[in-house]
Amino acid sequence: MGRLRRNGGPVQNGIFIPLPEDWRSCILPVIGLATPIGLLMVNFSAWVTSQLGAFRWGVAVSALISALILNSLSAINVYRYIRNRWPEFIISRVEHENVVLLGAIALVIIIAILSALFSYVGMANPKDLPNGIAVVTGFVGVVIPLGLIIGLNRRRSQGR
């Protein structure tokens, strides 16, 4: 299989990760593992589809929790960015802090409830999967919050 090397990247902090020096030696095992992993994924997907009624509630609750977390982080980052960038803007003023906080909480909760509802409705019929509502809800639920969090944090770190 070839000699093993130590990956010296900063993420691993010196932890020994056995990687072959010649990456081509990984091609055959990856090709060999593709079919069994694919079979497991197809069978698991079929089982989930057959049990969709139970999974709908779990996914809806997960969507609610996920949306609450991601949108809260997004709201905090947007508020910090606005407050630091435009300190005299109406929502940046200290006297409006409580109103802004209540509005942000209400908006985050409404978006989270809608996300959970669309996730639940989007999985109503196994024959309609995948469908547009579920795909768009999932995509928007990931891209917008993470884009805001990453983009605003990047702008904040570049400003320092």
Image: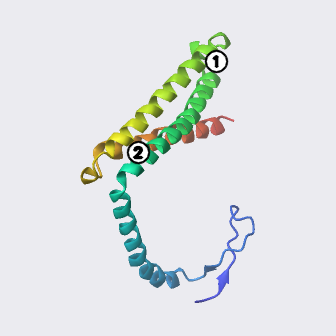
Distance of label 1 from label 2 (alpha carbons):
34 Å
* As drawn, 127 above or below 137: below
Q: Amino acid at mark 2?
A: Gly
* Image location of residue 152, percent across then percent down: 57, 36
Which residue bears the numbered disc 2?
Answer: 138
Q: Nearer the viewer, residue 66 or 74?
A: 66
- Categorize mark 1 by other alpha carbons within 10 Å: few (<14), some (14-19), many (20+): some
Q: Say the numbered circle drawn on residue 87.
A: 1
Write down the quadrant of residue 141 in the picture: top left
Task: Give the quarter of the figure containing the N terminus.
Answer: bottom right
Please indicate, yes or no, whether residue 89 appears anywhere in the rendered image: no
Is 119 positioned to the left or the right of 112 in the image? left
Q: Nearer the viewer, residue 157 or 147?
A: 147
- Categorize mark 2 by other alpha carbons within 10 Å: few (<14), some (14-19), many (20+): some
Is 106 positioned to the left or the right of 153 in the image? left
* Image location of residue 77, percent across then percent down: 59, 32
* As drawn, 46 above or below 104: below
Q: Earlier in the sequence, mark 1 or mark 2?
A: 1
Residue beneath the point at 60% across and 89% down: 2
Q: Nearer the viewer, residue 22 or 35?
A: 35
Secondary structure beneath disc 1?
A: loop
Write down the quadrant of residue 4 in the picture: bottom right
Residue beneath the point at 60% across and 82% down: 21
Please indicate, yes or no, whether residue 46 appears anywhere in the rendered image: yes
Q: Residue furthest top?
A: 95
Residue beneath the point at 43% across and 45% down: 57
Q: Amino acid at mark 1?
A: Pro
* Image location of residue 72, percent across then percent down: 57, 33
Secondary structure beneath disc 2?
A: helix
Frontmost of labels 1 and 2 is 2
* As drawn, 139 above or below 6: above
